[in-house]
Image (cartoon, rainbow, N blue to C red):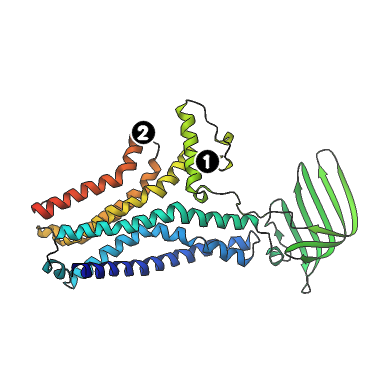
Amino acid sequence: MNKLIFRKFSLDIVNFFLISSFSITFIVWIIQAVNFLDLVSDDGHSLKIYFYYISLNLPKIFSKTIIFVFFISIFYVINKYINSNELIVFWNNGIKKIQFINYILLFSFFFLLLQLFLNLFVVPKSQNLGREYIKSSNIDFLPKLISEKKFISVVKNLTIFVEDYEKNGELKKIYINEKIDGGSKIIISKNGKIIQNDDQYFLRLYNGGITNINVDNTYTLNFSETDYDLSNFSTKSITHSKIQELDTKTLFNCLKKILFNLNNNEVIEISNLKNIECKTRPLVQISEELYKRFILPFYTLIIALIGASIIIEPKSKYFSKYHKINLFLIGSFVIIISQISLKFILSSISITILILFLPIALVIIFYSLLILITKFKLNLL
């Protein structure tokens, strides 16, 4: 009987969690999708690349909302049970309050493992796939961005200006400025058109001239017809991997190499490390990223205990009146602390150790307090 009761209770939490998390994730995803529209409007990528890239952000958004939505789910479901007097079923079947709390604590380990799995494997992989897709894609949306009397510079080292853009696709009075090593190349053409060859685009220019300008000299070459290849240019989007896109094993290797050099009292130059992914990655950034992946999920345990303690009503009428509000504020405060604490990583050895063990310490302290209240019935609240 007790198993059936707890199974229903667990399903209620999971159902509310899934509905809430998917709703919040979708809302945040829509907002981010709008912010990423510059991949098309400014960087010249196609809508296919855009939708692929923003879709790969879903695991990251979901992982960041888990701890807060899980706290809301526990708080809401237990409060619903209290208001509908469904908790009486637990007590009538001999389930003690500390057993109820223990079950929620054990149940929270599932969400802890879910967060760890997402943070350590799924999110870095999906983020890296999105970056690799941007890196390997061409600027196939560039032709649609070219418009009359506007300077277009959606790719690195290239600016295009068109005086007239006819409906038949013909361009008139074209100006191209390409930055090259030590100078620039300026192309002026009376007319031209955009040609597509497979997945690549190039400009076919007629009746114009090419001027190469560098430090040593300047020379001009006239042409009646020439093709200007656009596939040689890369997007202005950031193509190198960000630290949150590196896999966890790589981050550990970077941290190990840096700490090994520090232990040997060597002056560290991260740019000299053999692993290219470790270059320009400060120790603080690596530590913060590993902290977010490994330590932050453990705050799920203390959040679960805070949410479960709503069943323990204070004997004082004053505290009983604000009991639910106080617990909700405490839970929200702990979540805020978990996010702020990573900024103090490596500020000092003692603070770093405190931050690393803080979530487990909070669980031990809060759980000990709950045992005192439930078993010894001390009027501490």
Judging by the rendered image, the residue that carries numbered circle 2 is 349
* Residue drawn at the location 46% of the way across and 53% of the way down: 121
Asked whether disc 1 touches disc 2, contact meaning CB atoms under 8 Å apart, the reply is no
Q: Where is residue 317 in the image (x, y as percent from the top left)?
A: 10, 60
Q: What residue type is labelled 2?
A: Ile
* Residue drawn at the location 63% of the way across and 54% of the way down: 135
Q: How crowded is mark 1: few (under 14 residues within 10 Å), some or many (20 or more)?
A: some
Q: Toward which corner of the image does residue 271 lie, by quadrant?
A: top right
Judging by the rendered image, the residue that carries numbered circle 1 is 281
* Residue drawn at the location 17% of the way across and 68% of the way down: 87
* For residue 54, above or below residue 381: below
Which of the two residues, 21 or 107, is positioned nearer the viewer here?
107
Q: Where is residue 1 in the image (x, y as percent from the top left)?
A: 18, 70
Q: Where is residue 280 in the image (x, y as percent from the top left)?
A: 55, 40
Comes first in the chain, label 1 or label 2: 1
Q: Is residue 227 visible?
A: yes
* For residue 339, above or below residue 92: above
41 sits left or right of 5 in the view: right
Q: Can residue 381 be seen in this view?
A: no
Residue 355 numbered mark, or none: none
Q: What residue type is labelled 1?
A: Arg
